[in-house]
Amino acid sequence: MSLFSRKSQAADAARAELLSVPKSRGASSIPVIDVQNVHRIYESAAGYTHALKGVSLQVKRGEFLCIMGPSGSGKSTLMNLLGCLDTPTSGTYRLEGVDVSTLDDDELAELRATRLGFVFQSFNLLPRATVLRNVMLPLTYTDTPVNQRTERAVRALTAVGLPPEYYDHRSNELSGGQMQRVAIARALVNDPAVILADEPTGNLDQATGKMVLETFRKLRERGKTVVLITHDADVASWSDRVVHIRDGHLLTEEQERQAVAEGGAGGRGRT
Ligand SMILES: Nc1ncnc2c1ncn2[C@@H]1O[C@H](COP(=O)(O)OP(=O)(O)OP(=O)(O)O)[C@@H](O)[C@H]1O
Ligand SMILES: [Mg+2]
């Protein structure tokens, strides 16, 4: 069945409400995402890995940006920083004008809970919890009254077209495509300003993947900022802008073309 069946009025209404224009926070001229000269160096028993090498990136409100790059180029590292799940080794990151390095753990948790929606590469659902509980989880960290949480979760699940008979299933009893719908519903449930998605269509068939991308475009049309990571140029073609990442360096499309023309070894020294 279609993920977003045009026939379902309930789904349309739920989607319209979830995708409604957010109240703007701060002046619209301020980029929602503003990353300046960020480095991330991992330290492990095996030594140091310089995963991001001076990355700078601005994303405007209502922009749908794709980040493309080969495996190991630093995509998930960058996404974790954008999602305030990790901190840079150096450089600054401002989210909606706020320098996140000035926030304590509680403030960061609140920021994540209220301003950001995540769709992870591997879904990150709680396998033994029901679909409904998985979708309600982000609301635990907000001041949403308990009696409204179920209602909001149901609205989000309706918006992504998961039939109600699955709401009480444990998430480990679902197919990959169904799990991804639950993961997207969970990302939408707190009505975030920014949606961060790491390979959200990687495990989906073409038709379901297209529905997911249509959802992201709708979100963007309603003023949400969407940052999507992908290996796939077809997926990237749905976005407003593509940036490439190679070996921890960010390249514009123009720089990427030049790097490919020069033999594909580009990236060093470019931001
Ligand atoms: N926790 C970590 N500790 C040490 N090194 C890490 C850690 N996480 C990532 N790395 C390294 O940082 C580099 C970038 O990894 P990252 O996960 O960001 O790549 P990616 O572009 O998301 O790749 P993929 O497309 O395979 O998901 C890789 O060399 C990786 O081995
Ligand atoms: Mg990754």
Image (spheres, rainbow, N blue to C red):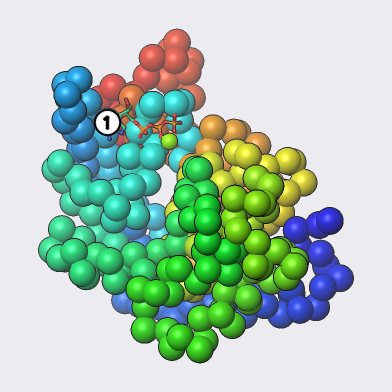
For the residue pair 174 and 92, the one nearer the viewer reads as 174
Residue at 59 percent of width and 63 percent of height: 131
Q: Quadrant of residue 153?
A: bottom right
Residue 223: give x, y in percent of width and height.
Answer: 51, 69
Q: Which residue is mark 1?
A: 51
Whether residue 245 appears in this view of the structure is: yes
Quadrant into which the N terminus falls = bottom right
Quadrant into which the C terminus falls = top left
State yes or no: Cβ of the residue under disc 1 lies below 8 Å from any atom of ligand 1: yes
Residue 132: give x, y in percent of width and height.
Answer: 58, 69
Residue at 53 percent of width and 38 percent of height: 230
Please, is residue 132 above or below residue 143 in the view?
above
Amino acid residing under circle 1: Ala
Residue 220: give x, y in percent of width and height.
Answer: 56, 63
For the residue pair 187 and 238, the one nearer the viewer reads as 187
Residue at 56 percent of width and 80 percent of height: 150
Whether residue 35 appears in this view of the structure is: no
Residue at 48 percent of width and 55 percent of height: 126
Please, is residue 59 above or below residue 202 in the view?
below
Q: Quadrant of ligand 1?
A: top left
Residue 24: give x, y in percent of width and height.
Answer: 41, 78
